[in-house]
Structures are given as structure tokens and as C-alpha cells.
Image (tube, helix red, strand yellow):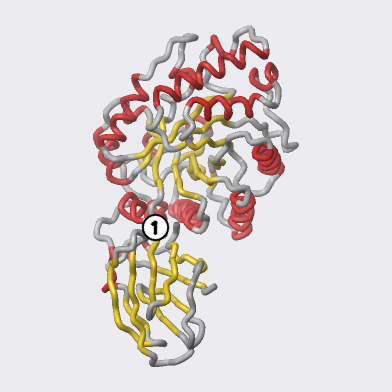
Amino acid sequence: MVAVFFCCTGSLWAQETLKTYADKIPLNIGTCVGSAFDSNDQTYINALKREFNTVVCENAMKPYSLQPSQGSFSFINADKLVAFAQQNNMKIRGHTLVWHNQNPNWLSKGSWTRATLLAAMKAHINGVLSHFKGKIIEWDVVNEAFDDSGAGARRTSFWQNTIGNDYIDSAFVYAHQADPAALLFYNDYSTCTMNTKSTAIYTMIKTMLANNVPIHGIGFQSHQQISDTSTSFFAGMKANFDRFAKLGLKISITELDVRMPLPSNQTALKAQAVVYRGFMQLALATPSCQTFMMWGFSDKYSWIPQQFPGEGAACIYDENFQPKPAYTALLDVLKAPIISTRFQGFSRPAHGPWSFDCESNSILVQDGQPGHPVLLEMFNPKGAKTGEYYSQSGVRTPLTPFNMARGTYILRANGAAARIPLIR
């Protein structure tokens, strides 16, 4: 096993957008889409197409939108966004199938038995997933099922009260039956770090997996504040993400925003940028994290001021669609990630172990014999050569001849091959 440290600079890609760099990794980077899109705000739509490769409906795929009357589905607004995404080569997250909030009255205020409510749940999931089958990369199947008591308790809801704890299991089973190819997620807030709530969710999912319930990932909503800048906060996030990843789960950051007291100021904006930067760095350092979503990208349309009076400015663009320091922070991390990984299946030459140190857009190869000639060859995962370069052991070689985008490559040094996962 040989350690690799890799850094790419922005010189390899010309266009300075989040989408351009995220596509190279690849990373699903996106935002929720709502009223601005529906009202055809062209400035908003242009920025949406320019910066993101993934979208999620802010409200148009929630139960009250899709099934306003029992048995009668309405997909008009959701279909409009799906069509837009397909036209612009964007991916789509589905949000959300089962939730205690934003339900039609016939559902939330109905008179149900366990059996009839389970049937209604199944009918809703079947109707929605059959309509969108093959178009959605990830579904938030169950949303916010745990309360904020600090005791790790289930939230009191008509789902919980009528069906019991296993309503969550049933929702995932029904979703998998309706679309076996869909990736199914549990989604919640205040769960980024290790706490009572995230531990209760961890225990629940571990039990679900042991019982063969088809759950594939967890979504961390990540509605943060500018005070979330400490090293201990991000260390706690890393430990928490790692324990869920060890269960074999995919990790998605699903609703990131970072609010502050209004009016904003430069100190607060810089602190906000630290939080956004930390989240992106953690996402790129977590191999199972392939989705990075924000809950809005312009302060003009943010939900925060209404939900948290006196607070706002939570997005990466201001109300005039001007990028804030938070935007630059995300862009900088995407442009130049520093990745630490290990070769697998590395074949060592007879004269001793190789080591590779990759930084500043260059590769330093060492085999214990300074000046020893080295032929470096780079191949893509399909075996096509992307470049070659003669170097010497102990001499730093620029990456420029390889013209490499970030991805997974095969590096061969004097015939000894090693697979290099760069980010992914």
C-alpha cells in the first residue's frame, strides 16, 4: 500500500463555475428550486443552469403538491422541473414521500386504521415512483421522523401514532417495490454531528439493514449557523459521516444553508464562507458522499427570513445574484482538492517500493534510487492511455502533459500499475 496526495489547480479547467468543476469529479452539486423557477425569473434560471448539475423541488414533490385529493395526482409543476433538468443535462433528487408536514388534509386529518393508512401510504408511493421511474437519482423516502427533545425519540405524527415504528420500514419497502433501481434515503436535520438524535437514527438504520429493509443512504439537511466554524464541529461531522458510511450507506448533504443575524456584515460573511468551505471539504473527503445540495442559492428567494425572523443571508449568492465569499469558498475547494488515499493492488518493482507525492500540479516519484529513469503512463478506467512522460526517481514531474481531469485513473510507473481514485 502506497499513500498518494493529489492536488489539481484551476489551470486545468477554463470556465469558473461550480458545475464545471463538480462535473469533473464527478459530484452532484445542486439546489432546491421553487417560486423563482415557477415565475420564470430569467436571471435565476440562467444562474441555475450555469452553476448546478442537480436540482430538487422545494415543494412540488411533497405530498400536498402531488396528491391534493385522495387518488388524484397532480404532476404539472414537478414535471416542469423534471423536463427543465433533462433539457439541461441535470440530475434530480426526489423530496419527499413520507413526512409529518405539508400533507393534504385528507391524509393528515383523515380517520385511519393501521391497515388503511398503510394502504394510503403505499398508494401514494406507487403513484409517485411509477410516474417518475428512471428519472430520479435519489429519493428522500422518509423525512424528519425524530423529534428535537434531545432524547432520540420518534416524532409524534399521524404516521407514528397510527402505524407505529415500522411505518418507516414499510415506506422503504413500498418504495423499493415501486422502483427497484431508485436509491432510497432517510433525511433529517440537526444530525450532522454525533448527538442523541443522530445516534438514534444510526441505531434505527443499523436495525433496518440487519432486517434487510432496502435503505441505501442518509441525507444530512445541514441548516447551519455562522457559529459552526470550530475544528471540533467538523471533526464531529467527520466521525459521524464515517460511522454511517461504515454501514455501507451513501451520504448526501441535502439542504445546506448557513444563516446569520441581519443585517449581514463582512465578518459574518467570512464566517459563513468558513462553514460552506468546511462542508465541501468534508464532502470531498468522504468517498460515499456524491451529492451536495443547498436549500436555495440566492438570498432573494431564501426560506430563512420567514422561518427564522431576524436572520437570513444564508445562501451563496446575495439578493442581486452576486456571488458572496461562500461561493468563492466552494469554488476554491472544488478547484483544488487535496486528497489522501491509498493504492490498491499495487505491483511493486523488484528494486523496492515506490512512493508518489502529488501536489502543486505535479508528481514526485521515488523508489529509493535517485536518478533512476521512470516512464510514467496514465490510463483512464477503460484502459485508454491519456498521456505518458519520462521522469527520474526523485525528480518532480508536472501534470500538464497528462491534461488530466479529476476522476479515476491508472498510473503505471515502469510497468508497475496502480489505480488512483482521485476524489471518487
Answer with the quarter of the image where residue 236 lies.
bottom right
Q: Nearer the viewer, residue 221 or 347?
A: 347
Instruction: Report the residue at 40% width, 46% height from top.
Output: 28
Work out whether 21 lies above or below 375. Answer: above
Instruction: Tell me which amino acid carries mark 1.
Output: Leu
Residue 399: image location, x then y, percent:
32, 73
**Residue at the (70%, 26%) spot, across then down:** 165
Question: Image height check: is 241 above or below 71?
Answer: below
- Which residue bears the numbered disc 1? 334
Residue in view at x 45 percent, y 31 percent: 94
Crowd band around label 1 with a 10 angstrom C-alpha radius: few (<14), some (14–19), many (20+): many
- Quarter of the rendering occupied by the C terminus: bottom left
Q: Is residue 82 visible?
A: yes
Q: The residue tagged with tag 1: helix, strand or loop? A: helix
Tell me if 329 is positioned left or right of 2 in this view.
Answer: left
Query: Which quadrant is home to the N terminus?
Result: bottom right
Relative to 342, does residue 116 appear above or below in the rendering? Answer: above
Residue 51: percent from the left, percent from the top? 32, 46
